[in-house]
Image: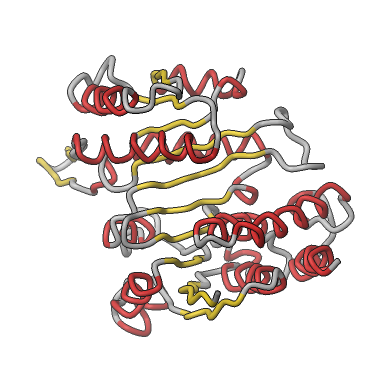
Amino acid sequence: MKHTITLIPGDGIGPEIVAATVRIIEASGIDIEWETQILGAQALEKFGTTMPESATDSIKKNKVALKGPLTTPIGKGFTSVNVGLRKTLDLYANVRPIRALPNIPCKYPNLDIVIVRENTEDLYAGLEHVVIPGVVESIKIITAKASTRISRYAFEFAQREGRKKVTAVHKANIMKLSDGLFLQCFYDVAKEFPDIPADDKIIDNCCMQLVMNPQQFDVMVMENLYGDIVSDLCAGLIGGLGLAPGANIGEIGAVFEAVHGSAPDIAGQGVANPTAVLMSAILMLKHIGERDAAERTERAMLEVFAEGQTITKDLGGTAKTADFANAIIDKLKK
């Protein structure tokens, strides 16, 4: 079966790691036509907008995209294109698997957690204004619709993937109305899945528990801001953002992306680690029904990590981006 997939190389190291990932995915033998689009600073320079309709229309048409990292200015300039893309396409479920890889030193070598983050509201709604000089108000939006939808996604994911438990993360002891609504919706949905245990943790305690005993968690579902923070915390438990894939799922499309930054300081040197984009692409293959290719690609990647001979500089090795990709491709061809 032939697939047409929107490809967004991104900024900084994005084009390098995305190109390496494309080579690996094509080596798996599936038939893909890549439809390249640009977003962010490149699009602003070319089209006068960070999110041209040609790019979003491409994703809507193809239903799936693979995206490299985009640069977001801090404190000034244009707003996050990543957040804008999720809002425009209603990509309400951010899925972040956190899995320890072979031969990568970390405190929890058997860790396997999936974080499901609500992607469309909370403080990330971006509703803020100056009340008076020196006082800024940001509005937190929580709705029953979004809370129910993300909770149901988490339970359906757990059911589909054979996971054992779903934990809601919240601060309902303080934000009794907003987080209280989220928690109520979670437990209402939990009743529809009596075979999957459900519990909840207050966000601050949850972060402590993740550092001390993360193995107690399986699937975790939470609001937007908590999910952003907790997913990065969990990435640190397995070696960093360079090893963490990401997926943004909605009813009209899905965008699979590396969750790390664009690292402009090493762009063009051919030393960037493509693992996060590659793992995101593996999630993408499963999403489009190419599970066999996904499993073979993942197996080849894990074998390269297990051997430890072709590891990029950020992980203590000497391999270039292309060397790492070539090692995985060689495994795929055997």
Identify the coloring: secondary structure
Please state the horizontal and vertical placement of residue 241, each as a whole percent of the image.
59, 47
- 22 vs 104, left or right, is left
Residue at x 31%, y 75% (from the top left corner): 57
Can you say whether 27 is above or below 238 in the image?
A: below
- Which residue sits at x=61%, y=19%? 213
Q: Position of residue 261 (x, y in %)?
A: 53, 57
Q: Tell me where residue 14 appears, x and y as whole percent.
A: 57, 68
Residue 4, above or below 81 = below
Whether residue 41 is situated above or below residue 186 in the rendered picture:
below
The N terminus: image quadrant: bottom right
Which quarter of the rendering shows the C terminus? bottom right
Query: In the displayed structure, does residue 87 sit left or right of residue 101?
Result: left
Name the foreground residue: 69 vs 36.
36
Q: Is residue 223 left or right of residue 260?
A: left
- Identify the residue at horizontal 23%, vertical 49% (top origin): 126
Query: Which residue lies at the image location 47% right of the left edge and 53% below the top edge?
Result: 247
The answer to which of 116 and 198 lies nearer the viewer is: 198
The residue most toward the bottom is 46
Whether 313 is drawn above or below 10: the answer is above
Most extreme residue toward the top, as rendered? 173
**In which image quadrant can residue 324 be found?**
bottom right
Q: Nearer the viewer, residue 44 or 121?
A: 121
- Please give the count of numbered marks on the rendered protein: 0
Residue 26 image position (x, y, % from top left): 66, 74
